[in-house]
């Protein structure tokens, strides 16, 4: 009899849903959609392939990644072009006869927002991996690293229906929030054909993120002009990192003969001869001109750029970017807008 009762009790426990952690039982926890199993599988895969590699290398850098949020003085260093002039310590500058800036220790709990561009061009990929897949993996890894320390994550998503609309996921903490965020990315369709208005995404983020936060603008930055001013306005109040998604085929065309190219944004098609060396040279020149324009836009906005390729490893790109930020904070600061992070041409 006791064996039968024990077996029934164990069966009922197995059938019951697992108890939620305290932070997810709280009122206002994010809902979980039907795609939660896919989001959970993605998280588990990234925990083994990316997060485990980053954990030991980023934990010690946690307090140096996002300086400037708190009130405790962390360090003094010489001023470099691109630093916020509001952080200049005038007393130290007068004593040492050279401009110095203050670095403040960040608050332990911060809010991070992911500004996600799910326009039609982000669905492109010349291989097995699309730019949208890179967007999902980057968001999952960074959100997981941040929520482990009790930080809150939210998102503003550009795409879906109606065309070119923006949706907001309020910033909350916990794994349930992370699963909800990944589920929304997976279930949100790309914006309908038409030009991307990245400025709309950035302006919506300005209205939503009222407290000083960390903002990751994840996009391929294929957009109508005018987003640079909005990005600069965000950078005045928040710590902003531009995460650019690229595919090597966007930089240079291989010799494939006669092919049909289609613009993902407008739907316009063009029949071209990639065997023509002059045409491939003009294509590469146009791509390089766009690269220079983007670098100038990031520099003027005062934000750093992490470039993620569909053919590069995410963990190596993040490690390279973190080392660059450490080097910047130690004094060897390059100009803002320098793209880093494992691009494979």
Image (spheres, rainbow, N blue to C red):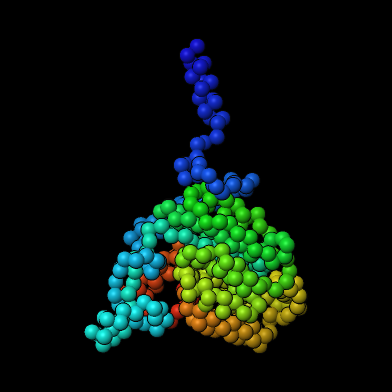
Which residue shows up at 58% across the image and 57% down it?
Answer: 169
Q: Nearer the viewer, residue 23 or 285?
A: 23
Q: How many marks?
A: 0
21 lies left or right of 160: left
The quadrant in which the C terminus is found is bottom right
- Left or right? Give the position of 104 relative to 128: left
* Quadrant in the picture for residue 329: bottom left
Q: Quadrant of residue 99?
A: bottom left
Q: Can you name the residue that lies furthest to the top here?
A: 1
Whether residue 57 is visible here, answered yes or no, is no
Of 176 and 145, the residue lying toward us: 176
For the point 34% across and 66% down, the residue is 71
Image quarter of residue 117: bottom right
In the image, 49: left or right of 28? left
Q: Residue at x 42, y 81 (%)?
A: 82
Task: List x then y, in percent, for residue 7.
Answer: 51, 20
Q: Could you tell me which residue is drawn at 48 percent across and 16 percent down?
A: 3
Is the residue 332 above or below the residue 278 in the image? above
Residue 23, given in percent of the width and then of the height, sits at: 47, 45
From the viewer's side, name the closer residue of 42 and 247: 42
């Amino acid at each position: 009899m006791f064996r039968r009762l024990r077996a029934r009790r164990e069966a009922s426990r197995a059938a019951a849903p697992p108890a939620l952690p305290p932070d997810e039982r709280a009122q206002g926890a994010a809902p979980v959609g039907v795609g939660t199993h896919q989001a959970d599988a993605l998280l588990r895969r990234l925990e083994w392939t990316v997060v485990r590699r980053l954990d030991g290398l980023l934990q010690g850098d946690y307090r140096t990644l996002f300086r400037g949020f708190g009130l405790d003085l962390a360090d003094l260093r010489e001023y470099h072009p691109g630093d916020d002039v509001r952080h200049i310590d005038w007393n130290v500058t007068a004593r040492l006869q050279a401009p110095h800036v203050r670095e403040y220790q960040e608050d332990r709990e911060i809010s991070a927002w992911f500004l996600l561009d799910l326009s039609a061009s982000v669905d492109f990929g010349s291989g097995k991996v699309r730019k949208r897949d890179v967007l999902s993996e980057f968001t999952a890894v960074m959100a997981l690293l941040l929520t482990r320390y009790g930080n809150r994550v939210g998102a503003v998503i550009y795409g879906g229906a109606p065309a070119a609309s923006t949706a907001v996921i309020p910033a909350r903490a916990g794994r349930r929030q992370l699963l909800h965020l990944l589920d929304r990315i997976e279930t949100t369709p790309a914006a309908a054909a038409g030009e991307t208005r990245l400025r709309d995404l950035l302006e919506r983020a300005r209205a939503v993120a009222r407290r000083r936060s960390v903002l990751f603008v994840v996009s391929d930055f294929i957009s109508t002009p005018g987003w640079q001013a909005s990005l600069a306005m965000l950078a005045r109040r928040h710590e902003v990192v531009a995460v650019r998604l690229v595919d090597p085929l966007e930089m240079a065309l291989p010799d494939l003969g006669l092919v049909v190219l289609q613009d993902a944004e407008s739907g316009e098609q063009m029949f071209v001869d990639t065997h023509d060396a002059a045409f491939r040279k003009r294509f590469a020149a146009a791509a390089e001109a766009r690269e220079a324009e983007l670098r100038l836009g990031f520099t003027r906005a005062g934000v750093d750029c992490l470039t993620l390729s569909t053919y590069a490893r995410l963990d190596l790109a993040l490690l390279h970017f973190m080392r660059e930020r450490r080097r910047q904070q130690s004094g060897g600061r390059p100009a803002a807008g320098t793209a880093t992070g494992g691009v494979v041409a």
